[in-house]
Amino acid sequence: ESFRKSDSTKSLLIKSEQLLRIEDHDFAMRPGFGGSAIPVGIDVQVESIDSISEVNMDFTMTLYLRHYWQDDRLAFPSSNNKSRTFDARLVKKIWVPDVFFVHSKRSFIHDTTMENIMLRVYPDGNILYSVRITVTALCSMDFSRFPLDTQNCSLELESYAYNENDLMLYWKNGNDSLRTDEIALSQFFIEEFHPSFGLAFYSSTGWYNRLYINFILRRHIFFFMLQTYFPTMLMVMLSWVSFWIDRRAVPARVSLGITTVLTMSTIITGVSASMPQVSYVKAVDIYLWASFLFVFLSVIEYAAVNYFTTVEEMKKLQKGKLPVSYDATQAMAYDGCFHDDIDVSPFPELPTTPSTTRTIPPRASSTEPPPTEGTRLWRKRSVGKNIRFIMSNSYMIDSYSRIIFPLAYLLFNIIYWCIYS
């Protein structure tokens, strides 16, 4: 009986010191090998989201990954210790779940000042294995509504060594298995964090459990308003200044138009350099190229004004309505002090009304009655005559452009922000 008692004491001593002398045992094999699947609970605490790169289409996240399972071989009797905690040295000698991150580009375990790994063993054989990891993973981003969109990204966990008959991953506390610290991002704010699970099939090995960490991010639009949208709006409005500059001030209007075009090209190039080369059109591309079109059309508008003014002056010169000494080429290159009131030979007197401040062009049909008060001249003309009238009075193109360009750009902005906001 005394022999049996001493043997029992010896076995308890060995059992209690088992974790301290683990080299004497083989714990590298999966517990319960050949039996049913081992459930491994997972919970995650996200410490930070370090960066989200649109160019590389990935994100970097630092998190605490915790595993929970039971290994009866590590159970020990204890009356005063609720658990025992070990560092990474014991992890290398026992079996631990081989969980990995799907679509991971690179990841590492923090090792300052020691490896950030914690193993806690309870008397009944339950184990908590926690590791602090920084992982960079792919995120399939959709830029069709950039920068007025939300981004849905996910971090996927899977065990590659076993299929669902050997190892079963699950969220230990359901939706409460994913916790986050106060995370602040420069260009995004987090709308939602939630876990989910599913199955992944590989043709050569079968079905595997997969856990997902899903998060939805929305961009801070004010950053892009300051960096992209506001400068673009100002460049478009700056291009309209040329409509108020005298049409004969060629150097002033041409230089203003070319400057705004080149500035818009620089903005478009800068935005494109910070974006991936996707094959579809982004929301910001629509806005930039539409604004570029408005700036480009303002340059074309002056080219039309310049051309029609030249034609008009040459016709007057040929009909002898301009002095012989009048040089149309010099007038077109004048610095802006030359106006429409040119000293010419007297024109035939034409009827005017209080509502009409300009002289009716001498080319108007003599059979056409003068406009009466409350009427407009172009209502009595056909479309072709109106076009010829505007061509022969090129100053009217600038007058119409001062109204048409701002209204068209305002309409475009209303439609754009209604669609994408």
Image (cartoon, rainbow, N blue to C red):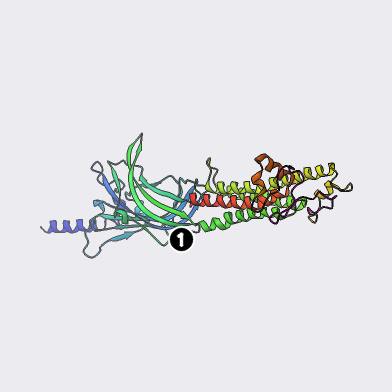
Q: Residue at x 26, y 55 (%)?
A: 126
Q: Residue at x 55, y 56 (%)?
A: 225
Q: Position of residue 205 (x, y in %)?
A: 34, 36
Q: Residue at x 60, y 54 (%)?
A: 233
Q: Residue furthest bottom?
A: 80
Q: Nearer the viewer, residue 418 or 204?
A: 418
Q: Is residue 342 magenta?
A: yes
Q: Which residue is mark 1?
A: 184
Q: Position of residue 210 (x, y in %)?
A: 34, 45
**Range drawn in magenta:** 339-368
- Location of the N terminus (image quadrant): bottom left
Q: Is residue 153 magenta?
A: no
Q: Position of residue 301 (x, y in %)?
A: 69, 46
Q: Position of residue 38 (x, y in %)?
A: 26, 46
Q: Residues within 10 Å of mark 1 (few under 14, many from 20)?
A: few
Q: Main secondary structure of the magenta part?
A: loop
Tell me the element at label 1.
loop
